[in-house]
Amino acid sequence: MIAAQELHTEFQFPQETDTQLSSDTDVEDPDVKNAKLGKGKGGRKGKKAPGEKGKGGGAKGTGLGGVNGHHQENGMESMTLFEVVKMGKSATQSIVDDWIESYKNDRDIALLDLINFFIQCSGCKGAVSAEMFRHMQNSEIIRKMTEEFDEDSGDYPLTMAGPLWKKFKSSFCEFIGVLVRQCQYSIIYDEYMMDTVISLLTGLSDSQVRAFRHTSTLAAMKLMTALVNVALNLSINMDNTQRQYEAERNKVMAKRANDRLELLLQKRKELQENQDEIENMMNAIFKGVFVHRYRDAIAEVRAICIEEIGVWMKMYSDAFLNDSYLKYVGWTMHDKQGEVRLRCLTALQGLYYNRELNTRLELFTSRFKDRIVSMALDKEYDVAVQAIKLLTLVLHSSDEVLTAEDCESVYHLVYSAHRPVAVAAGEFLYKKLFSHRGPEEEGMPRRGRQSLNGNLIKTTVFFFLESELHEHGAYLVDSLWECAGELLKDWESMISLLLDEPMPGEEALTDHQETALIEIMLCAIRQACECHPPVGRGTGKRVLTAKEKKTQLDDRTRITEIFAVALPLLLAKYSVDAEKVTNLLQLPQFFDLEIYTTGRLEKHLDSLLRQIREVVEKHTETDVLEACSMTYHALCNEEFTIFNRVDIARSQLLDELVDKFTRLLEDFLLEGEEPDEDDAYQVLSTLKRITAFHNAHDLSKWDLFTSNYKLLNTGLQNGDMPEQIVVHAMQCTHYIILWHLAKVSEGSSTKVHTLFFVCKMNQMRAFCLMCQRYLTSVNTTVKEQAFTILCDALMIFSHQIVSSGREQLEALIYTPDSPLQAELLNFILDHVFIDQDDDNNSTDGQQDDEASKIEALHKRRNLLAAYCKLIIYNVVEMNTGADIFKQYMRYYNDYGDIIKETMSKTRQIDKIQCAKTLILSLQQLFNEMLSDLGCNFDRSSSSFCGIKELARRFSLTFGLDQLKTREAIAMLHKDGIEFAFKEPSPQGEGNPPLNLAFLDILSEFSSKLLRQDKKTVHLYLERFMTFQMALQREDCWLPLISYRNSLQAGGDDDTMSVISGYSSRSSSIRTKKAKPASTGKRKLPEAEESSSCSTDAVWMNQEQNVQTPVMMPSPHLTSTGLRDPKKMRPEESYMGVYAMTSEQQHQQLPPQQHHHQTPMDYNNLWPLEDVMMSSEDRLEDLNEGMDFDTMDIDLPPSKNRRERSELKPDYFDPSSIMDDSVGIGLSLRVQ
């Protein structure tokens, strides 16, 4: 028996015994084996003295490779068990059979192979020898194997990447399972093999070496799973034997076979003994491995334990599915790692899926239901998905478990941007609201207003309205599509709910409900035709399978057939409702237009065109008009025969609109007095319709440019033009210019085309000048429209217009001059960088309305993004971005992402110019501070500290790679130094320069300089310093002193630079002691020294007004050491450097090193000790000596035996939960 208390940590490998294995093989049929159990049990109990040798001891061990010839045929006779499993070329069954045959020949040799198999699977290079196997304790063996680990690599087979190692893990697990299955009839009961294996795995699982602990835990858990399967089979056999015994005993005395009764009793006794031994083995693994490792410091180890205990509970629920084991899963649901929480949920799903087990889960559900509900909002999406699926199973098992609040917390996830979460929530919603049918619903029709689907569609509409997220109808439909696709495709029932009159006693849909139903119907049609998730959910379009393509075509055909008839009726009913009409007019975009001809539906097409015309005449809303325009665009497809019919209707409508606009405009502009409101409204409404159609249709043949330009010019001259007329006139003219550009791009080089080209080029320039003049308008809406159109025009007609072989368009390039750039920048500063309360765009007392504030912020963000695009694409000068960058800190919450992305893009274009722009923004802020506070400002003031913090943020954007930004940082320091000494002191000679405090701001960038560049920058600084300045120590000179110190010390920064540049070496030198350099100091070769000197000389001899980079890169990557490594004391190592401040380091340096620093080659840099090792070496395994609150594994009795009457304790009581202070087994990797 292997009880937990009997299984010592130190295992002593048993010596050979005289146990004679039964002649039967271990792979026979279970029924046959059960009949032979008596033969095997007799020889299993005996043990010989340690000094005796068994029969098998004299046989020469041939090892695995020489058994049965299986591997000899494949040329694997010299391979170890690990290599054979890793290769995966042989069937696991044959590998195990070979090992069993080897075990029968010589147990010690076979067990030694198995032990080395586990050792090698852990990635250890060493091997256990026969001498070690006989005479060493397990702690000594494990310690010896620990020393054999490869120090240069932390990888081991279970963590290595690649298909070979992924397959190895599955082969490893399969090998253990097959081994137990093949040995389940005799070998596992010989008190030798399983004792040895379990002792070995228990010892390895308690090792501080991660590889040992991970591999042995996986092996032990798989071994436990295999034993659970054996125990289950034993339980079944015991029940069968008991039933046979009862049946035989109940026979009359004349027919009763006493010898059969004795055989059955003996068999039951054998089975009971086997079951007791299996219980002891499982107890040993559970107490020795599981209860320690389910709280391991490594997430993978914890996940293995939870995954396997879920398998045990599902496989052998009579023994394991109780609160004593469920509590481990419940506790681990609070794990910090998502992988472990995920394994908990998948384990529980297997239990809740079986309804027969629900009664055993009642207590667990009541205690951990709230935790499962909260995991639906887990930060790990995979965990959230599985949590929702588990709640769906809980809901499926019982409707009373989850409260209304629990369900509502899942409902809103149908609007999640993460599609798997939304789909899982949609399935939960469908199960809760749509899957229950009452008896009265069984005889209802399938489709129509009175159908079952009609009621379910109403329920969907009610849910959509109650969620108060009306703009996310597409998300709701996508979430329900997989589970309720048939319901959402019941468009006949939807149309019936909208068009048919309600039956007597039936409650009709309200206006809001009809609007919601139309939106859901549109979203369902779009989902069926496009077959991809809505925008913002999903990674884009995927390739459809043949079946999906066929379904898509069938759905599109059915949609066309249904709505070609119903759409005109729906438009007629809701023609005055703008929101409903806008959604309905989008339906023709998804039609198969060929069906209008093949289905002889032309009369319905004419009816649709008449309804669209009426909608255009009735509405002036932009959304409705644009929907009408897009519908005409969808129907006017030259590939279909209906094109002529639709084109005629469109031309007639546009002719009337243009004629009406021309007539109204002439009257409107000819009036000498101020135009009345009716005339202005007529002009505006007609202009809106024309603008909406010009967006999707080419109206060039009507020559609308002249009319719109005249209208805009009159507005500038008189200044009394209604703002909406000006806005739409600008937009319409912008469309005219774009359609002209499209024609010019596709045209030929004829004389007529050249004249047209010149004419349109002049129109474009005249319109841009007109928009520039409107930037000074008093009306904010007009200025915003002019700014937006100008930014778009400048982008379209920039130098990039000639790309992709369009050199003929070079004359259209429009480059903004300096006044235009200044006006655009001033607009941004005046209308974007303002406080929320200063925004004058919100009217009617809506300043406090949260929705209006968000909309206004969104509009300002668009304006800023439009201007930043001009900077990024080099349309305007990059230095104009200085006024944008300086707002980074103040408006970080509103525009921080846009400004940061702009800085990143500009740095990619030109690192040096970007750096000059950043320092310019800091200089502008500094000058603004001087004008506000005066020259005698306090450097602790909020204004100065804000500028310094902004400089720190700018410094962080340069990243960690100092070589890539070397020249840019150098130029930044150069411009900063020149600015600091540019203006003399207003108080006369002897006082610090006016801008000297700027050096304090500039010091934030000193850490980004390489050591040799710091020296060069310092020399450049000394050019501006006098001898008296170097001697000053007053407070007013502190910026100069601190800046010089930042250029001279730099010990921390250089150390960090070296470590960051050579972090790849850290893994290989973690446990190695740093080797001192062989020489005290190293010198660069003469070529390098001359090169470095020449570099410094080049910079020192340049004039201050030079704008090119002044520091040339040195030929080789070099750095400077703080001190001689050989002379460095232990407390002065890099570990000590990290613990000291820069001032302390500077004080501890020898005096001569303040002025002279020895160059050192990076390539020969001595190894650095890993910072973390000093703390890791002090950690101890907190599991040692802990007593865990665990139970013995007690397999359930036979069904015919007396049931236990005592109640199980409540293992979910807080008092029974292990104290959180109990340490988790730590995982120190020994490299």
Image: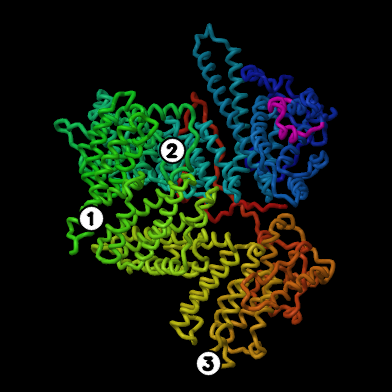
The reply to whether callout 1 and callout 2 are in contact (CB within 8 Å) is no
Question: Which amino acid, mark 3?
Answer: Gln
Give the residues in magenta: 78-97
- Answer with left or right where residue 1194 lies relative to residue 1066: left
Where does label 1 land, which residue? 666
Q: Quadrant of residue 404?
A: top left
Q: Quadrant of residue 1175?
A: bottom right
- Answer with left or right where residue 142 lies relative to residue 979: right
Instruction: Calculate the distance from the C-alpha at mark 3 to the C-alpha at mark 2.
Output: 72 Å
Q: Residue at x 51, y 17 (%)?
A: 246
Where does label 3 land, which residue? 987
Where does label 2 land, which residue? 532
Which dot, 1 or 2, sits closer to the camera?
Answer: 1
Q: Say if 690 sits above or below 987 in the image.
A: above
Residue 195, visible in the rendered structure = yes
Which dot, 3 or 2, sits closer to the camera?
Answer: 3
